[in-house]
Amino acid sequence: MTKDLISIVIPCYNEEESIDLYYKEMEKIRKKMSVEFEYIFVNDGSKDKTLPVLRNLAKKDNNRVRFISFSRNFGKESALYAGLEFSTGNYVTVMDVDLQDPPELLPQMFELIKTEEYDCIGTRRVSREGEPPIRSFFAKQFYAIINRISETEIVDGARDYRLMTRQMVNAILEVKEYNRFSKGIFSWVGFKTKYLEYKNVERAAGETTWSFWSLFKYSLDGIVAFSETPLAFAALVGLFSFLIAIIMMFVVAIRTLIFDDPTSGWTSLVVIILGIGGLQLFCMGIIGKYLGKTYLETKKRPIYIVKETEKDKKI
């Protein structure tokens, strides 16, 4: 009987210190499971020694370790898509190389997906210990907002770390949009999913490359990708401003004609102009965000470009 094969997709950006630690921990898990592993490391244009480390690891374990190296940094979303596209296993999992996704959960995930009728076993953090309070606060607000304005449910604290059937992976690969937000795509494609909860785990080595600003931009991409509510909000703001202007016009006319009270000076006029102008620019910014994303989609650029894999002679 042929063993099941789990393809493990691991995006890497400047993770030279974490790769060997991750590989050793995962090998301990593999030896406890009656399943084969296929490691797919995706080097997302790292500037450190991530690529040489991956080359050495592929030489050391050429039966299980594969890698894809991009021509430049395309972002984690592109790395995830590339890993899923190159995967060959009948089950596929996505993990961070910094060991913040606990490898010890994988046997339980595999058992659940094999014995129960689930297409995906995901994970979610129930605590954010060790994370800056300001980041935790805004993360919670993001999940609260997007689940109010989007028809696609995005579970609070859900990680990319999940074990999926080949059928679900193929469905995800059918979503070929350039502007990707995987947490939303995982939910959008459907399939029966169960979440395992765990407490936050600190990085095993190295430093995170996710700054507050990059996370903020990523959250905006998620909102734009899975909700049209901001566009409706912009329209409502415009309508509300127009109604206020009409009301104020009647107020000024009545004061002048009936009460012989002339219109106030230029100060109030400047305040009104600045207020209305600010609202217009705000609404134009919302529309521009959607227009910009549409523009990128129409270019039909590739999601990623591969420069090297473990099959090349360089290693």
Image (spheres, rainbow, N blue to C red):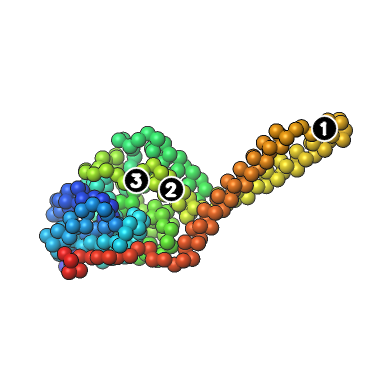
Local crowd at mark 1 within 10 Å, few (<14), some, or many (≥20)? few
Query: Mark 2 falls on what kind of element?
Result: helix
Q: Is residue 152 above or below residue 205?
A: below
Residue at image point 27% right, 54% down? 46
User: From mark 1 to mark 2, how far is it between C-alphas?
Assistant: 48 Å
**Taking 310 as reference, is 164 left or right?**
right
Mark 1, mark 3: which one is toward the viewer?
A: 1
Q: Nearer the viewer, residue 97 or 146?
A: 97
Residue at image point 46% right, 66% down? 299
Amino acid found under the numbered disc labelled 1:
Pro
**Taking 94 as reference, is 134 left or right?**
right
Local crowd at mark 2 within 10 Å, few (<14), some, or many (≥20)? few
**Taking 136 as reference, is 312 left or right?**
left
Displayed quadrant of residue 141: top left
Amino acid found under the numbered disc labelled 3:
Trp
User: From mark 1 to mark 3, how far is it between C-alphas?
Assistant: 57 Å
The residue under label 3 is 210
Query: Mark 3 falls on what kind of element?
Result: loop
The residue under label 1 is 262
Q: Nearer the viewer, residue 288 or 57?
A: 288
Residue at image point 24% right, 47% down? 98
Q: Position of residue 126 (x, y in %)?
A: 34, 40
Q: Visible in this render: residue 79? A: no
Q: Position of residue 277 (x, y in %)?
A: 64, 44
Q: Which mark is residue 217?
A: 2
Displayed quadrant of residue 211: top left
Which tag, 1 or 3, sits closer to the chain's start? 3
User: From mark 3 to mark 2, how far is it between C-alphas?
Assistant: 11 Å
Q: Nearer the viewer, residue 262 or 34?
A: 262
